[in-house]
Amino acid sequence: MSFSTVLTSRPNLYLPKKTQNFYFPIRCLSSPSLSVSSQSKLTQFDLKTYWTTLNVEINQKLEEAIPVKYPEQIYEAMRYSVLAKGAKRAPPVMCVAAYELFGGNRLAAFPTACALEMVHAASLIHDDLPCMDDDPVRRGQPSNHTIYGVDMAILAGDALFPLGFRHIVSHTPTELVPEARLLRVIAEIARTVGSAGMAAGQFLDLKGDPNSVDFIQEKKFGEMSECSAVCGGLLAGAEDDEIERLRRYGRAVGVLYEVVNDVLEAKLMEKEEMEKNQKKGKSSVSLYGVEKAMEVVEELRTKAKNELDGFDKYGDSVAPLYSFIDYAVDRGFNVGDLS
């Protein structure tokens, strides 16, 4: 995400909890591109309460969506990652927010929101494998393969992808969302996780080519966020130009979050660690340096907000999407504590 949960690993980096109030010098809550009414929405909207409320509902529905069946160990491994207490639920929350932008009942978006979390969790399980990013920790707990073994982790991830698609088809009320829209949602998710999306980003990340950092970040982090926003719009029957605005918005927010992670990590690193990390060439900071990366942050924030300016006609409903942008930079609260 997309918005990631722990920051030790790719696609997530690790930061101690105390860094949630870390000072970040780019503070453009009143971006020049924003209208006065949009700035007002930002100052009045309570993102923490919105996110917390949605997390409660999403967690309950995820619990119901993955009951333990035979063979039990596969389901236990699936549940271990999907129901992790440290999960931010950023993909489903963004999906619901995009759906509600157009005035729909959020109940119609929950099946797709849950599917996005399943797909997100599956991608993290596979990313953490020893043959991939080799990360022992995820979402504040041991990675799936550390607990269940590599073989079971692969199976758990493999099972979560189709379960997500099935959940959309079997649980979305067709009286609220026509089947044609569901087909577009499924196609969007399939594109996101495939060889033109997240898989492409992971492949280039494994190669470690420093010239591919921008592409890697767009595919590994921008794609999930983009997909989440687009799926919400597709469910709601948004116009094609609105879908494309959501696509560009979501991609910018996903990359923005990761670039900020890179900057925060760089500022907390010891010099020796930073030099070692720079040699790997896998982050915005290693490619551009801290100051340039901070400029990239501002460009991405402005780009995302510019896309939302096209939704002013929907009034206050756009406020959650605006707030996600500033949260990606300012980290005003620890989302991992909301689960």
Image: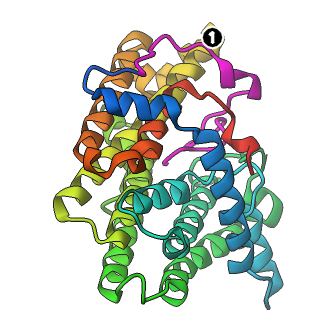
Q: Which residue is denoted by mark 1 in the rendering? A: 272
Q: Position of residue 24 (x, y in %)?
A: 53, 15
**Displayed quadrant of residue 224:** bottom left
Quick one: which residue is furthest to the left in this view? 241
**Displayed quadrant of residue 115:** bottom right
In the picture, measured across the screen, residue 120 lies left or right of residue 305, that is right
| Colour convention | rainbow
Q: Position of residue 81 (x, y in %)?
A: 71, 62
Residue depicted at x 56% and y 42%: 10
Examine the structure image and report whether residue 15 is included in the region drawn in magenta. yes
Residue depicted at x 30% and y 61%: 196
Q: Nearer the viewer, residue 101 or 28?
A: 101
Q: Position of residue 111 (x, y in %)?
A: 54, 76
Magenta highlight range: 1-29
How many discs mark residues in the rendered view? 1
Q: Is 100 placed above or below 177 here?
A: above
Q: Position of residue 256 (x, y in %)?
A: 42, 33
Residue depicted at x 63% and y 60%: 125
Examine the structure image and report whether residue 67 is included in the region drawn in magenta. no
- Identify the main secondary structure in magenta: loop
In the picture, measured across the screen, residue 242 lies left or right of residue 337, that is left
- Residue 282 seen: no
**Displayed quadrant of residue 291:** top left
Callout 1 amino acid: Glu
Q: Is 107 placed above or below 135 here?
A: below
- Residue 117 seen: yes
Mark 1 residue crowding within 10 angstroms, few (<14) / some (14–19) / many (20+): few
In the picture, measured across the screen, residue 251 lies left or right of residue 126, that is left
Give the SS element for disc 1: helix
